[in-house]
Amino acid sequence: MSEQSVLLLRKQLAELNKNPVEGFSAGLIDDNDIYKWEVLLIGPQDTLLASSILSSTVAKNGDVCISILHEPGEDKFGYEKPEERWLPIHTVETIMISVISMLADPNSDSPANVDAAKEWREDPNGEFKRKVARCVRKSQEMAFE
């Protein structure tokens, strides 16, 4: 990767350490690899903070489906405007704030995880909520192992 991206990411990491942002904390998994981060999300009050398996806007493989992470340019499906897609002005902070927003208010009209979107639309306080709670507990256990 480019030296410029390394410098930019190091600057953003230093800024996050100096001025933490409410809702998440982030750091490197390995101090020698600026491209691998570990992030702890703190769910907004009164939300389900859906997990990567169950969120309708997170694919089953963990890929996050939010516009600002999509390649720049025209959307071949016509769902997103070019200015809603990746732009070099985005930072780790703006991306994480978008992820938190997406988890707090998922878009079931354009889901990456169709099954989760269907469950969420049909019975958000039933089985979907129970699955989310189980998944959140599991991820918390894994985080503290």
Image (cartoon, rainbow, N blue to C red):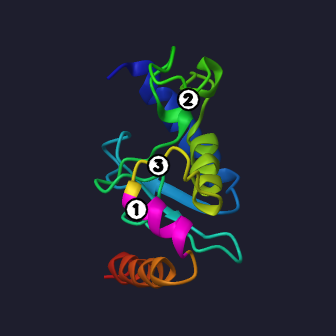
Residue carrying label 2? 79
- The magenta segment is 115-123
| Position of residue 137 in the picture relative to residue 48 (left or right) | left
For numbered disc 3, what is the local secondary structure? loop
Which residue appears farthest toward the front when viewing the image?
122
| Mark positioned earlier in the residue sequence (3 or 1) | 1
| Mark positioned earlier in the residue sequence (2 or 3) | 2
- Residue 116 occupies quadrant: bottom left
For numbered disc 1, what is the local secondary structure? loop
Instruction: Give the label, 2 or 1, closer to the camera.
Output: 2
Residue carrying label 1? 52
Q: CA distance from mark 3 to mark 1?
A: 12 Å
Residue 49 or residue 75, whichever sits in front? 75
Residue occupying the point 55% across, 65% down:
121
Instruction: Give the label, 3 or 1, closer to the camera.
Output: 3
Label 3: few (<14), some or many (≥20) within 10 Å?
some
Residue carrying label 3? 111
| Mark positioned earlier in the residue sequence (2 or 1) | 1
Q: Are marks 2 and 1 in contact (CB under 8 Å)?
A: no
Residue occupying the point 70% across, 62% down:
22
Residue occupying the point 38% across, 40% down:
34
**What main secondary structure does the magenta stretch of the protein show?**
helix
Identify residue type, mark 3.
Answer: Pro
In the rendered image, the vertical position of residue 116 relative to residue 70, given as above or below:
below
Residue 83 or residue 91, whichever sits in front? 83
Residue occupying the point 55% across, 35% down:
67
Label 1: few (<14), some or many (≥20) within 10 Å?
many
Q: CA distance from mark 2 to mark 1?
A: 22 Å
